[in-house]
Image (cartoon, coloured by chain):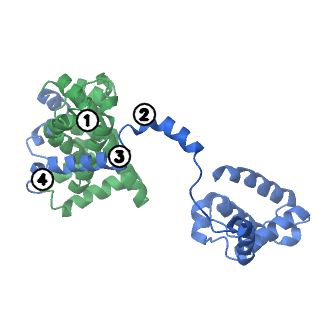
Chain colours: A green, B blue
C-alpha cells in the first residue's frame, strides 16, 4: 500500500483500525528482528515489540511525514529497545556493559538461539561495542539498511554512520581473530 | 554493500553468509497480529470510562443547573445532627490523642537529623529552639510514628551518611545550620 495513503488512513479515526492492521502485518517481522538484535532474548523482544506498536498507535497523529513512515517506526522501536535495556540494568543494579555481557552469556542456554560457535562469538563481539555502534553494525551488517535510511532513523549524519560502521567492523574482526 | 565490507574486513564479509542464529517459537508471527491488536483494543477500552449521559444532556446542562439551583434540597439528616456534630468530632479527637504521621520525604530527613543530633549528644546543644525540635523528633521516632529502618537511611541518604564521622566534634552552629537548611528544603518535597 502507498505510504502516504496508509498514513492518511492511520490518522483518520474512521479508518485507523483497518489501517493499523495493515501496518502491523507489514512491519511486525522487520521491527521484531530489529528489536531482537538489540535485546537478544525472544520474550524481551516480544514485550518491546508490543510496546512499540502501542506507542505507534498512541502517537500516529504526531507523525508529520517529515521522514519516511518506515524510519519513524524504526526510530520508535530503537528507542523502546534502549529504554528497555536501561530499565533492566537499573532493576538489576548493574552497568549497561555488564548487562550486555550477561545477556550474551545467557544465549548459551537460550532455547531460541541456535547459533553455532561463530555466531555466538559474533554476538559476543557485538556486545563489546558501545550501544550505538552495536545498532549501526546490526542495521548495516545483518539488515543491509542504506546509510541514508539509517541517518533518518538514528538522526545521525551519513558520514558519522559510515565511520561508526567501519570502527565497529574493525573491532569485531579483531575480537573474532583473538578470541 | 559487499564491496564495502570486503574492504573493511574480508573475514566479516565471509562470515556474513551465516545466519544470525536467533529463532522464534513456532507460529509466533502468525499469532502476533492478534496479540498486538488485542493490546490496542485494551488500550482503547481503558480510555473509555464506561459512563454514559442521556441524549442531549450537554445541550441542556446549563438550563438544568439553573433550574436545580432553585429547587429545595430533598436530602434529610437526623434531627439534631448538625448540633451534635462538633461534639462527635471532639470525641474522636480525644480518642486519638496520638497524632498519625505519614512517612514522607519530610519525615525521613527529620528523623535522620534527629538521630544525627542525638548521636553526638544533646548536651552540646544550648539553643532552646533546637532542643524542642530534637525532643519532638525523638518522641515521634520512639512512639513509632516515623517508621524508618537502616535500609531507608542508607538508600536515601547514602552520601550524607558517608560524610558523617560520629566521633568528630560538631559545632552547635553547624547543627543548627544543617537542620535549618534541610527543613527549608524538605517542605518542597511533599
- Cα separation between marks 2 and 1: 45 Å
Q: Position of residue A23 (x, y in %)?
A: 18, 36
> Could you say which disc has been placed on residue B28 in the image?
4
Is the residue B125 above or below the residue A139 in the image?
below
Determine which quarter of the picture holds residue B91: bottom right
Disc 1 + disc 4, Cβ < 8 Å: no
Q: Residues within 10 Å of mark 1 (few under 14, many from 20)?
A: many
**Chain of residue at mark 4:** B
| Above or below: residue A92 compared with residue A144 | below
Residue of label 1: A74
- Name the residue nearer the viewer: B152 or A139: B152
For numbered disc 3, what is the local secondary structure? Answer: helix
- Which image quadrant for residue B96? bottom right
Q: CA distance from mark 3 to mark 2?
A: 24 Å
Which residue is identified by label 3? B47
Discs 2/1, front: 2
Q: Earlier in the sequence, mark 4 or mark 2?
A: 4
Residue at left offset 26%, top offset 34%: A73
Judge the density around disc 3: few (<14), some (14-19), many (≥20) Cα neighbours within 10 Å. Answer: few
In space, the residues marked 4 and 3 are separated at their CA atoms by: 28 Å
Q: Along the polypeptide, which appears first: circle 3 or circle 2? A: 3
Q: Which residue is mark 2?
A: B59
In which quadrant will I find the N terminus of chain A?
top left
Amino acid at each position: 500500500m502507498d505510504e502516504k495513503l496508509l498514513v492518511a488512513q492511520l490518522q483518520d479515526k474512521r479508518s485507523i483500525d483497518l489501517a493499523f492492521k495493515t501496518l502491523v502485518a507489514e512491519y511486525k517481522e522487520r521491527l521484531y528482528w530489529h528489536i531482537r538484535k538489540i535485546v537478544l532474548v525472544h520474550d524481551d523482544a516480544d514485550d518491546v515489540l508490543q510496546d512499540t506498536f502501542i506507542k505507534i498507535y498512541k502517537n500516529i497523529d504526531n507523525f508529520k511525514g517529515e521522514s519516511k513512515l518506515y524510519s519513524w517506526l524504526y526510530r520508535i522501536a530503537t528507542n523502546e529497545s534502549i529504554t528497555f535495556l536501561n530499565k533492566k540494568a537499573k532493576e538489576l543494579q548493574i552497568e549497561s556493559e555488564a548487562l550486555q555481557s550477561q545477556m550474551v552469556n545467557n544465549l548459551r542456554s537460550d532455547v531460541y538461539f541456535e547459533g553455532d560457535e561463530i555466531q555466538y562469538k559474533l554476538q559476543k563481539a557485538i556486545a563489546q561495542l558501545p550501544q550505538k555502534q552495536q545498532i549501526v553494525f546490526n542495521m548495516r551488517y545483518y539488515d543491509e539498511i542504506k546509510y541514508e535510511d539509517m541517518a533518518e532513523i538514528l538522526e545521525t549524519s551519513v558520514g558519522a554512520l559510515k565511520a561508526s560502521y567501519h570502527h565497529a567492523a574493525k573491532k569485531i574482526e579483531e575480537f573474532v581473530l583473538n578470541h | 554493500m559487499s564491496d564495502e565490507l570486503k574492504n573493511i574486513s574480508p573475514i566479516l564479509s565471509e562470515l556474513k553468509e551465516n545466519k544470525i542464529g536467533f529463532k522464534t517459537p513456532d507460529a509466533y508471527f502468525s499469532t502476533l497480529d492478534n496479540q498486538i491488536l488485542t493490546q490496542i483494543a485494551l488500550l482503547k477500552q481503558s480510555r473509555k470510562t464506561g459512563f454514559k449521559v442521556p441524549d442531549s444532556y450537554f445541550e441542556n446542562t446549563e438550563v438544568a443547573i439553573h433550574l436545580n439551583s432553585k429547587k429545595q434540597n430533598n436530602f434529610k439528616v437526623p434531627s439534631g445532627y448538625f448540633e451534635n456534630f462538633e461534639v462527635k468530632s471532639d470525641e474522636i479527637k480525644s480518642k486519638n490523642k496520638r497524632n498519625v504521621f505519614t512517612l514522607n520525604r519530610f519525615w525521613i530527613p527529620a528523623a535522620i537529623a534527629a538521630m544525627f543530633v542525638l548521636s553526638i549528644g544533646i548536651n552540646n546543644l544550648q539553643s532552646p529552639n533546637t532542643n524542642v525540635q530534637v525532643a519532638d523528633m525523638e518522641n515521634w521516632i520512639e512512639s513509632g510514628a516515623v517508621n524508618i529502618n537502616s535500609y531507608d537511611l542508607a538508600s536515601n541518604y547514602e552520601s550524607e551518611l558517608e560524610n558523617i564521622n560520629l566521633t568528630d566534634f560538631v559545632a552547635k552552629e553547624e547543627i543548627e545550620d544543617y537542620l535549618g537548611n534541610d527543613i527549608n528544603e524538605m517542605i518542597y518535597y511533599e
